[in-house]
């Protein structure tokens, strides 16, 4: 076995462990949602799209509605780690708030907040940076990609963003973070930081650590591609946004890439573009993609697109209606954020007080 194979085998084993643990947690969630606190987040660099919805936000709403306490971060300080300036930050934050309300996030139950409004969260970065090494950071897959692939010099914030994410998770003592498998290294680092903090500065009573060991919650959502058949991503302009109207949605789906075989099948590796559209219709219709493909039969690309358009527009109609109502009243959205920030600040100040006490710096 080469070194590379060994690394792969190790990560396969740890992935299998995480999958098993997620199944276990799903069972616990069903019977005892009160034992979990969830932290999730989004970078406000653009609009949320249907890939975000099916990949993450639908699951957040599910957890919220099960009675799990949830903190939802609009990660505005993450916007500045890989670009100059802040972009349309106020507009992006406002639209994220409207998307949340549209998708069913209930601000009375889920604490919605922004990084920059929570000084005590950000202060956790200092002791956390002290227990993290630069080689751990350079090994992080996201940082590594950035180092290898980016034309711009890496900022110090980019290098240390996994530590900042650990602060996002630990300031509210979240013990559960819904993620995709590519995010597992972040959760692992968060666990390491939590453990090291307690080893180095922790309380006199080792059985009562300041920070919990957070678990990842992996979900089995299929990856949605963009309308051009490549990864759906706001930077590529191939997304269908949550807030788009029905006509724009229809136009984008009409332009989607398909192939010349009129017989529709669900074959993600052989026919990725067609299968992606089948998948999207299936998600909106709550049906199995194989069934949707079979029913379409020889309908061709045109028939497929017609079905997808109807399914997407129908599924998102109530979401879009709620969203439109929300964005019509920006003052109300800013009030929701102010409320969430007040709650997050209370929690962050409490945690920071414990941290300073553990470190004997509570003068
Ligand atoms: N990086 C996440 C994104 O791009 C947002 C985020 C910030 C996050 N801090 C987090 C997610 C902590 C999980 C845990 O959407």
Image (tube, rainbow, N blue to C red):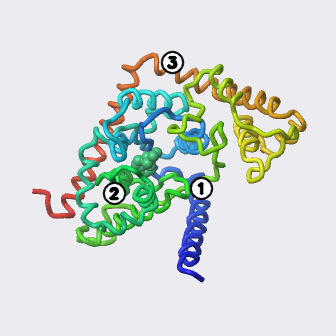
Residue 251, given in percent of the width and then of the height, sits at 67, 24
Q: Residue at x 57, y 24 (%)?
A: 244
Residue 261, given in percent of the width and then of the height, sits at 85, 41
Residue 305, given in percent of the width and then of the height, sits at 76, 31
Task: Mark 3: give few (<14), some (14-19) or many (20+) Cα within 10 Å.
Answer: few
Task: Mark 2: give few (<14), some (14-19) or many (20+) Cα within 10 Å.
Answer: many
Question: Which residue is identified by label 1?
Answer: 26
Secondary structure under tag 2 reads helix
Comes first in the chain, label 3 or label 2: 2
Comes first in the chain, label 1 or label 2: 1
What is the distance, in whole Å, between disc 1 and disc 2 at their CAs?
Answer: 33 Å
Q: For the C terminus, which image quadrant?
A: bottom left
Residue 266, given in percent of the width and then of the height, sits at 80, 47
CB contact under 8 Å: marks 1 and 2: no
Q: Residue furthest right?
A: 298
Number of the label disc, if any, that sits on residue 325:
3
Task: Please say if 147 is above or below 301.
Answer: below
Residue at mark 1: C-beta within 8 A of ligand 1: no
Q: Residue furthest left?
A: 363
Secondary structure under tag 3 reads helix
Q: Quadrant of residue 50?
A: top right
Question: Which residue is identified by label 2?
Answer: 159
Q: Nearer the viewer, residue 36 or 215?
A: 215
């Amino acid at each position: 076995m080469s070194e590379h194979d060994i690394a792969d085998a190790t990560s396969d084993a740890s992935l299998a462990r995480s999958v098993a643990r997620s199944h276990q947690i799903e069972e616990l969630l069903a019977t005892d949602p009160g034992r979990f606190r969830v932290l999730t987040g989004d970078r406000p660099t653009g609009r949320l799209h249907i890939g975000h919805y099916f990949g993450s936000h639908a699951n957040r709403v599910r957890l919220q509605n099960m009675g799990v306490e949830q903190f939802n971060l609009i990660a505005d300080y993450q916007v500045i780690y890989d670009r100059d300036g802040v972009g349309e930050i106020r507009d992006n934050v406002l639209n994220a708030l409207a998307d949340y309300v549209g998708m069913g996030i209930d601000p009375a139950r889920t604490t919605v907040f922004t990084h920059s409004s929570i000084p005590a969260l950000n202060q956790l970065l200092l002791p956390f940076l002290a227990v993290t090494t630069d080689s751990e950071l350079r090994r992080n897959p996201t940082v590594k990609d950035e180092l290898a692939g980016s034309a711009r010099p890496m900022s110090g914030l980019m290098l240390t963003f996994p530590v900042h994410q650990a602060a996002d998770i630990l300031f509210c003592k979240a013990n559960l973070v819904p993620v995709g498998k590519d995010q597992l290294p972040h959760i692992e680092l968060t666990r390491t930081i939590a453990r090291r903090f307690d080893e180095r500065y922790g309380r006199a009573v080792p059985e009562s650590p300041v920070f919990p060991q957070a678990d990842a919650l992996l979900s089995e959502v299929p990856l949605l591609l963009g309308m051009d058949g490549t990864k759906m991503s706001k930077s590529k302009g191939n997304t269908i946004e949550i807030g788009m109207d029905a006509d724009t949605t229809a136009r984008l789906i009409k332009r989607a890439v398909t192939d010349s075989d009129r017989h529709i099948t669900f074959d993600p590796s052989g026919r990725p573009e067609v299968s992606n559209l089948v998948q999207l219709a299936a998600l909106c219709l709550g049906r199995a993609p194989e069934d949707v493909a079979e029913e379409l039969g020889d309908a061709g690309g045109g028939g497929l697109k017609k079905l997808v358009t109807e399914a997407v527009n129908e599924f998102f109609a109530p979401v879009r209606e709620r969203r439109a109502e929300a964005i019509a009243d920006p003052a109300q959205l800013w009030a929701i954020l102010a409320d969430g920030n007040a709650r997050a600040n209370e929690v962050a100040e409490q945690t920071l007080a414990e941290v300073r006490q553990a470190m004997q710096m509570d003068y």
